[in-house]
Image: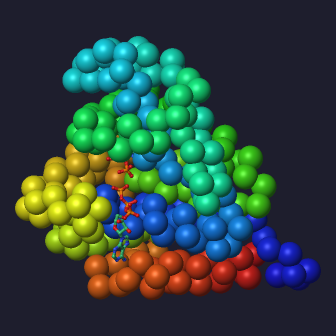
Amino acid sequence: MENGAAQPVIVAIDGPSGTGKSSTSKAVAAQLGLSYLDTGAQYRAITWWMVNNGIDIEDPTAVAAVAGKPDIVSGTDPQGPTITVDGVDVAVPIREQDVTSKVSAVSAVPEVRARITELQRTIASSADGGIVVEGRDIGTTVLPDADLKIFLTASPEARAARRSGELKGADLHTTREALIKRDAADAGRKTSPLAKAGDAVEVDTTDLTLQQVIECVVTLVEEKRAAK
Ligand SMILES: Nc1ncnc2c1ncn2[C@@H]1O[C@H](COP(=O)(O)OP(=O)(O)OP(=O)(O)O)[C@@H](O)[C@H]1O
Ligand SMILES: Nc1ccn([C@H]2C[C@H](O)[C@@H](COP(=O)(O)O)O2)c(=O)n1
């Protein structure tokens, strides 16, 4: 870096559920003055809209026919990310079990992915100072030219323990099975499945604290920025 100004940088963070993508991405973006985009929240938002409008989510043709209808807006401040659908704040309802159990089916529909991918690229290209975008297909499909790609992993046991803690003591076995089922659906779909990009740096977070993961990613971003 020649003039001391921070270089804009695009960071893609992918991985299965509960590996720490959201917590890490938000903290890294806040620390480095970058924008932050939670793409899972967008897929949850479109799923919430489908459910609320009585669309049969088991019918991909019905889902595809209305994929362009909801107006989904994401706020990208890492200190307070927001998500609205047709002007309604859906940050809370999109985390409910009903949406969580249906989001993989809705996000497997190619027309849904095309719509949301376009939205994501528009947001990333208008983030002047740079952005951390987290999801499942960011490094492979949405932003294949990202400056840095990270793929977070963790054992199913560690991920289930983290989620059970969040869900206030939910049964560990049931949580683990639900995570594995959602990952299998996300990794097994035809259109832009959950996958590690060939040029992504894999970070196994099983035995790392969240703080250690954040520090690791901040270092990787700073190295990339310095080399630009
Ligand atoms: N390295 C870690 N050690 C312990 N707990 C962690 C670690 N990373 C994240 N967590 C905790 O695990 C939970 C899940 O993390 P987070 O929501 O960031 O994962 P995610 O990959 O974004 O999940 P999803 O894809 O399902 O949204 C949170 O409660 C978070 O605080
Ligand atoms: N880039 C993405 C992001 C998310 N999804 C789908 C698959 C996930 O199960 C679901 C919810 O994501 P989460 O909030 O748990 O991160 O959304 C996807 O297909 N592509």
Which x, y percent locates residue 221?
A: 62, 76
Quarter-wise, where is residue 196 in the image?
bottom left
Q: Tell me how the rendering is colored.
A: rainbow
Q: Is residue 38 left or right of residue 36?
A: left
The quadrant the C terminus occupies is: bottom right
Q: Is residue 40 visible?
A: yes
Along the horizontal axis of the image, is 128 left or right of 88? right
Q: Quick check: 189 above or below 216?
A: above
For image coordinates 35% across by 84% down, the residue present is 208
What is the x, y in percent for residue 46?
Answer: 43, 30
Percent from the top left, x then y, of residue 129?
A: 76, 61
Which residue occupies the foreground of this view, 63 or 141? 63
| Residue positioned 46% across, 61% down in the render | 22
Task: Specify whether 49 is left or right of 98.
Answer: right
* Residue 13, placed above or below residue 42: below
Q: Quadrant of the N terminus?
A: bottom right
